[in-house]
Image (cartoon, rainbow, N blue to C red):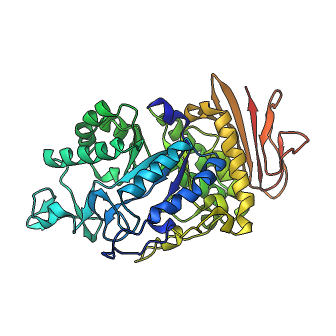
Amino acid sequence: MTPWAEHAIWWQIYPLGFTGAPAAATGEPPRHRLRQLENWLDYAVELGCSGLLLGPVFDSETHGYDTIDHFRVDPRLGDDADFDRLVASAGERGLRIVLDGVFNHVGRGFKPFAEGRKWFRRKGSEVEVFEGHAHLVKLDHELPEVAGYVTGVLNHWLDRGISGWRLDAAYAIPPEFWRRVLPPVREKHPDAWFVGEVLHGDYVAYVERSGLDTVTQYELWKAVWSSLNDANFFELSWALKRHDAMLETFPPQTFIGNHDVTRLASQLNDERHTGHALALLLTVGGVPSIYYGDEQAFRGVKEERAGGDDAIRPVFPATPAELAPFGWPMYRLHQRLIGMRRRHAWLVRARSEILHLTNRAVAVRSHSPEGEVLTLLNVGDEPYRFPIATGGLTVIGSPVPGDGGDPAVVAGHSWAVLSRE
């Protein structure tokens, strides 16, 4: 993995929702909404993030994942000049940009489809569609023309100043496809970073066969909120063992929220456990991302219906000053834990070890030759004393800055992060 990505902490944004763009293409001239993101670059820097992980920005029919032109900025968001301006403004602040590339399927308005090119998978005389969505037609990844097209798209936007790609629905694309696509891209852009969206299965095998840098870690995402809701840290322990095995090959892309799932504040049965989830995200190995709004305790439930993603892809105000006051304590908690993560950058490849485990309490040791971080989680009602030695460890994170007393004792429904370097 390219060295800069070892230090990356992403703020993930879904631009069409963030900017309040219409739900479907309008045919109007470019509206320059992409410029709204510039008002939030300092906010991202102050949060502690090092880059923007952007959802779809290319011309599409509706939600961005039905692309019709990979070489054109969606007119609902703006034009090439708006994009170049955003890249330049982000770069001035040290922020990198990664784009969302949808190459498993396209919208029916995609020009090669309208022209009748044979780029698409078929069953008999019918073109295949993606997961039952009639308006999403699947590309045929066996064809060299498709591989050449994708290579061209990747290089085009890397030439324009982005730093990498999130590859949507990679789980539905044969990993060997990326083995054909990526070498000419890496030859031209050796520092580019590539993350594939993979939901389940053999993550390590996919990375090894595809040549990607990493994949999304959905197993850990599920185990974090599920173990907190069920008061069952044995599930978390199992997931961390799987996670640790991945780290022998690559650091997974970790998250506790994204554009496709119910927001953490709504997913958790007890919002007091939000800090527990965030502490885990930022103390175990991986390349973490924060989904816009989670750092402000936004709520939102994903529903399986038309428009069911709207609640988790909301409009943001014009500037941070217009955010509601209730979210800023959560923002400051994110700042503290992200700051800890940046001071302990070696955590990206840290291995995890369970030092103590009950249903309601767990001690996770994240370690490397460069240091050690101990994360203590208690979801019980009463204070819990962890039977572990804490000599030489310093409390570097807890719900209340400057907590005193025995660092091995954690209050009910609370957590602590300790460090030894």
Q: Residue at x 31, y 38 (%)?
A: 210
Residue 169: tell me if it is visible.
yes
Q: Give the quadrant of the N terminus.
A: top left
Q: Is residue 413 left or right of residue 221?
A: right
Residue lying furthest top? 369
Q: Position of residue 361 (x, y in %)?
A: 73, 48
Q: Quadrant of residue 126?
A: bottom left
Q: Quadrant of residue 31?
A: bottom left
Residue lying furthest right? 405
Q: Position of residue 47 (x, y in %)?
A: 65, 50
Q: Is residue 228 left or right of residue 413?
A: left
Q: Residue at x 65, y 39 (%)?
A: 341
Q: Position of residue 265 (x, y in %)?
A: 64, 64
Q: Residue at x 55, y 41 (%)?
A: 94
Q: Is residue 144 left or right of residue 16?
A: left
Most foreground residue, 337 or 157: 157
Q: Quadrant of residue 108?
A: bottom left
Most foreground residue, 268 or 238: 268
Residue 323: tell me if it is visible.
no
Q: Position of residue 137 (x, y in %)?
A: 22, 64
Q: Residue at x 55, y 32 (%)?
A: 349
Q: Give the quadrant of the C terminus.
A: top right
Most foreground residue, 276 or 298: 298
Q: Is residue 373 left or right of residue 198?
A: right
Please tell me how many numbered marks the rendered image carries.
0
* 7, above or below 27, in the image: above
* 225, above or below 18, in the image: above
